[in-house]
Image: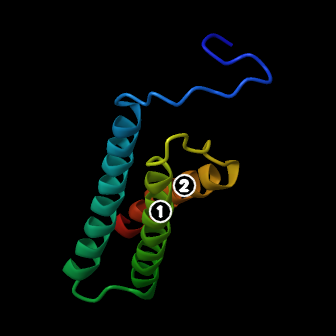
Amino acid sequence: MAGSAPRGQPRPARDPGLQPERTRLAWRRTTLSCTLVAILAGRQVVQHRAPGPVTVLAAALVLLVWIAFVAAAQLRMRAMCGSRPPALSARTALVLAGCACALAVLGAAILL
């Protein structure tokens, strides 16, 4: 691997440059997108004169999924502040992907 320290020698201090900042900004944009979906879902429920139980349930699930996504994204953004942030775990990646898919499905369910 190019640029890595030979075995047995300590790794040099990380020169992060702007990469962690770009990654944090990407997380912020993604969180903002998920927030927009949650707000639009809530708006759709409020605009219905008599929302059915399925619509209310879907809106509640959107809120829960949004909270889970924001919490996981915040943890990841905080982890990026370290000098050598850990790799994204498979569990966290699965949770985040599941949240994104769930928001898409629930948002579509509220519109129908």
Q: Nearer the viewer, residue 84 or 66?
A: 84
Gap between marks 2 and 1 measured at Cα = 6 Å
Whole-percent x and y of residue 77?
Answer: 43, 52
**SS class, disc 1:** helix
Q: Mark 1, residues whose alpha carbon is within 10 Å: few (<14), some, or many (≥20)?
A: many
Whole-percent x and y of residue 88?
Answer: 60, 45
- Residue at image position (52%, 54%) is 101
Instruction: Check the picture and name the quadrant holding the C terminus.
Output: bottom left
Q: Nearer the viewer, residue 14 or 65?
A: 14
- Residue at image position (38%, 69%) is 110
68 to the left or right of 25: right
Residue type at numbered disc 2: Leu
Query: Quadrant of the rendered structure where residue 32 is?
Result: bottom left
Query: Quadrant of the rendered structure where residue 92 is?
Result: bottom right
Along the polypeptide, which appears first: circle 2 or circle 1? 1
1 to the left or right of 59: right
The residue tagged 1 is 69
- Mark 2 vs 1: CB contact within 8 A: yes
Q: Mark 2, residues whose alpha carbon is within 10 Å: few (<14), some, or many (≥20)?
A: some
- Residue at image position (41%, 38%) is 20
Residue farthest right in this picture: 8
Instruction: Check the picture and name the quadrant holding the N terminus.
Output: top right
Whole-percent x and y of residue 42?
Answer: 28, 75
Residue type at numbered disc 1: Phe
Whole-percent x and y of residue 6?
Answer: 74, 16
Which numbered dot is residue 96? 2
Compared to 26, does 3 lie above or below? above
